[in-house]
Amino acid sequence: MAKRKQKEIDVCPNCGTKVEKPEKTWNLISPLPDAQGRITITVMGSYVCPKCGHKWRGVVSKIKAGGSSVEVEGKKGVKKIGGEEDNKTKDEGEIIELDLSDLDEEE
Ligand SMILES: [Zn+2]
């Protein structure tokens, strides 16, 4: 994994202290869908440094919803829900029924 050039959102830009949780979060919903017709929901966070009292805001995560899948973009990367993965599950879930009484008759 390549290191991010961008600074971590939960690290104080003033003194470098890592903050566990944002003081509060809220969602920003983009009214314009992207190229794939999905709506982007941006989760914003407001942080307060417990060490120096510095306050800042940043993007906690992004959620792309719409179409056949939902994408959640967070600290651990992009997580896809539905779409291709959903189709795979359907194929693997196919049940082939064997009729044992037919085998008995052949013996
Ligand atoms: Zn600080």
Image (cartoon, rainbow, N blue to C red):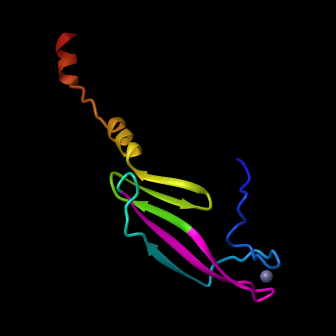
Going by the picture, which residue comes out furthest to the bottom? 53
Res 70 quadrant in image: bottom left
Specify start and end residues of the magenta stretch as a single range: 38-60
Ligand 1 is in which quadrant of the figure? bottom right
Horizontal and vertical percent position of residue 102: 18, 19
92 is higher (above) or lower (below) than 67? above
Tell me: 23 left or right of 43: right
Going by the picture, which residue comes out furthest to the right? 15
Residue that appears at 35% across and 41% down? 87
Tell me: 6 left or right of 43: right
Total marks shown come to: 0
Tell me: 41 left or right of 78: left
Residue that appears at 27% across and 29% down? 96
25 is higher (above) or lower (below) than 80? below
Residue that appears at 73% across and 57% down? 5
**Which quarter of the rendered picture does the C terminus lie within?**
top left
Tell me: 67 left or right of 106: right
Horizontal and vertical percent position of residue 101: 18, 23
Q: What secondary structure is the stretch in magenta mostly built from?
A: strand
Residue that appears at 79% across and 76% down? 17
Question: Is 60 or 99 nearer to us in this picture?
Answer: 60
Reply yes or no: does residue 5 show up in magenta: no
31 is higher (above) or lower (below) than 4? below
Res 20 quadrant in image: bottom right
Horizontal and vertical percent position of residue 18: 75, 74
Res 60 quadrant in image: bottom right
Horizontal and vertical percent position of residue 41: 45, 68
Going by the picture, which residue comes out furthest to the top? 107
